[in-house]
Image (spheres, rainbow, N blue to C red):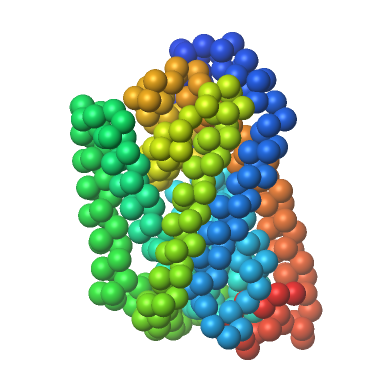
């Protein structure tokens, strides 16, 4: 985190603090509009998550929207390797009545659908970049990175089918026997729940549809930000910046919030499309302000919700016998 923060400050200092500050002043209250716009792809992603559990009693979309809101905040603002939010989101679903194995399995499957659609979204951006810019050394390394991402994605998907989470479940069972932690013991059945969700091909197709739409609509945030900065870009350019910018951020998962790395990625991608470094930096910083505007309230409501859940009387558990989240 310290290294990323130093890199971010160094980039702003090198390319001109005054220029970046002027760009951010130009956006002004438009940052609120950018944050509000992001609620649209967030809702679409929540629908993708809900689709994994599609069927009778799969729960209110408001529950999944809340879980998605907190999940993005945790992954974006806390040092959890951009994966901790999945487990926090599953925890929110259990607080609304889902069984822990079903909630965690659904979160894993939803992440799989999101990553698969992101790969094809990145591929779309790469094709558009080659059409607009041609092939050079930078584009070549982007192609190499996408190929490596395909290998990692394949490994993640195959691990689910080859019993990785069955081993995880056994490990949790042993841990439960040693520690006596009820939360760990409650994960029995994770592998079976994961296999059951993966067999519902129709649900997976619906989930991929919503996630794909979320990625595409998300490019509107790029278009809006650059419009507020006085740059009228094409839809293709917005798709290039959003798809490959998100790919760079995902590749830097070990860096909390992809600090510095996201900014460097936008500088490179923006340069290929003819944008000055200060504009590219301002684009990235606008995304970070949006994360703060939406993320800080999400973290606060998460903690309040956890406090309310823990203070509930034991005799009134939240729908403990149900298998899917219900609206309060």
Q: Position of residue 282 (x, y in %)?
A: 54, 25
| Residue 42 at x, y percent in the picture | 58, 54
Please tell me which residue lies in front, 148 or 134. 134
Q: What residue lies at 66% left-to-right and 33% top-to-bottom?
A: 31
Q: At 40% across and 70% down in the image, what residue appears?
A: 205
Residue farthest toward the bottom in the current orientation of the protein: 321
Q: Is residue 268 above or below residue 18?
A: below
Residue 225 appears in the figure: yes
Quadrant housing the C terminus: bottom right
At a point 67% along the width and 51% down the height, the residue shown is: 299
Numbered-mark total: 0
Left or right of 77? Residue 216 is left
Residue 152 vs residue 80, the one in the foreground = 152
Inspect this view and state whether residue 89 appears: no
Q: Position of residue 291 (x, y in %)?
A: 60, 41
**Which residue is nearer to you in this view: 55 or 265?**
55
Q: Is residue 231 above or below residue 97?
A: above
Between 96 and 202, the one lying in front of the other is: 202
Q: Position of residue 12 (x, y in %)?
A: 51, 18
Res 96 quadrant in image: bottom right
Q: Is residue 74 left or right of residue 126?
A: right
Q: Quadrant of residue 36?
A: top right
Up the image or down, 14 lies above or below 248; here it is above
């Amino acid at each position: 985190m310290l290294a990323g923060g130093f890199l971010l400050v160094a980039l702003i200092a090198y390319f001109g603090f005054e220029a970046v500050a002027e760009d951010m002043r130009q956006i002004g209250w438009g940052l609120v509009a950018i944050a509000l716009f992001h609620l649209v792809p967030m809702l679409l992603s929540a629908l993708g998550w809900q689709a994994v559990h599609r069927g009778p009693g799969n729960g209110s979309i408001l529950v999944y929207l809340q879980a998605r809101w907190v999940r993005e905040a945790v992954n974006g603002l806390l040092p959890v390797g951009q994966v901790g939010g999945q487990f926090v989101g599953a925890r929110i679903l259990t607080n609304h009545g889902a069984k822990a194995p079903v909630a965690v399995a659904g979160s894993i499957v939803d992440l799989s659908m999101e990553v698969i659609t992101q790969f094809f979204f990145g591929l779309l951006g790469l094709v558009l970049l080659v059409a607009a810019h041609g092939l050079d050394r930078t584009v070549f390394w982007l192609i190499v990175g996408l190929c490596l991402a395909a290998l990692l994605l394949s490994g993640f998907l195959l691990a689910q089918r080859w019993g990785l989470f069955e081993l995880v479940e056994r490990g949790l069972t042993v841990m439960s026997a040693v520690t006596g932690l009820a939360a760990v013991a409650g994960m029995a059945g994770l592998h079976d729940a994961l296999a059951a969700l993966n067999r519902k091909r129709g649900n997976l197709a619906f989930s991929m549809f919503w996630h794909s739409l979320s990625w595409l609509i998300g490019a509107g945030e790029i278009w809006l930000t650059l419009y507020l900065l006085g740059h009228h870009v094409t839809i293709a350019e917005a798709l290039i910046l959003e798809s490959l910018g998100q790919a760079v951020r995902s590749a830097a998962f070990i860096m909390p919030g992809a600090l510095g790395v996201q900014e460097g990625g936008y500088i490179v991608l923006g340069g290929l499309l003819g944008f000055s470094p200060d504009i590219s930096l301002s684009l990235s910083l606008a995304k970070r302000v949006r994360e703060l505007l939406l993320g800080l309230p999400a973290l606060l409501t998460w903690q309040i919700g956890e406090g309310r859940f823990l203070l509930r009387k034991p005799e009134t558990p939240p729908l403990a016998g149900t298998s899917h989240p219900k609206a309060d």
